[in-house]
Amino acid sequence: MNFLLFGGQPDSGKTSTVTRLTNLLLSTPFSFTIADGIFPPVGGTDFLILLRRIVKGQSQYVIVSSPSDDAAAINNLRDFIIKHSSDKIIDIIISSVRDIDWERGYFFTTIKINPTDVNVFEIPLARVTRRHSSGLFAPAINWYETTVDRLVNFIITNPPFNL
């Protein structure tokens, strides 16, 4: 099981990045389907889902979790992993994670991984701080999201993820 984590402070784009990646995985050429959970979320922006696709007769499973802000969300992810690991091999877990503070420690302890494990890959995210009044926020956020998405696409299509 490999982990792709998006780390950062509050409002650094973790959920929106995970959402864009989920939309990518649901579209061609990846063509995953939702096996459990609801996406897009009915209320709010956070979601926890299981994706599935069949490649060369083998099922691939990916768990995607957008929230990591509190113990309840982290516990939900842990329980979801346990639920689905009992009868299938989960290939990848994609999640947000806080950059510092108790939430980060709680995440790694609860999920039983370390940020330096060979199967854990964390992409750091940061806020775009251009002021809206400057007229430069829109092009700056567009550049940031496009660049992050290109890097993520490269990462998920190469070892160890190989999607």
Image (cartoon, rainbow, N blue to C red):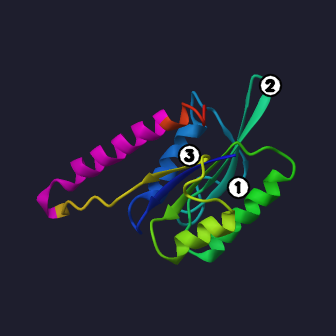
Name above or below for residue 69 compared with residue 81: below
Where is residue 161 drawn, in percent x and y? 60, 36
Callout 3 crowding tier (Cα within 10 Å): few <14, some 14–19, many ≥20: many
Q: Earlier in the sequence, mark 2 or mark 1?
A: 1
Where is residue 42 drawn, in percent x and y? 60, 61
Identify the residue at image location x=60%, y=39%. Answer: 26
Q: Give how far apart the Cα atoms at labels 1 and 3 are.
A: 13 Å
**Quarter of the rendering occupied by the C terminus:** top right
Left or right: 124 in relation to 27: left
- Tell me where the magenta segment starts and ends, as one range: 133-154
Q: Earlier in the sequence, mark 1 or mark 3?
A: 3
- Residue found at the far left of this picture: 134
Tag count in the figure? Answer: 3
Callout 1 crowding tier (Cα within 10 Å): few <14, some 14–19, many ≥20: some
**Residue 134 belongs to magenta span:** yes
Question: Pointer 2: what residue?
Answer: 57
Left or right: 37 in relation to 132: right
Callout 2 crowding tier (Cα within 10 Å): few <14, some 14–19, many ≥20: few
Which mark, residue 55? none
Name above or below for residue 23 compared with residue 109: above
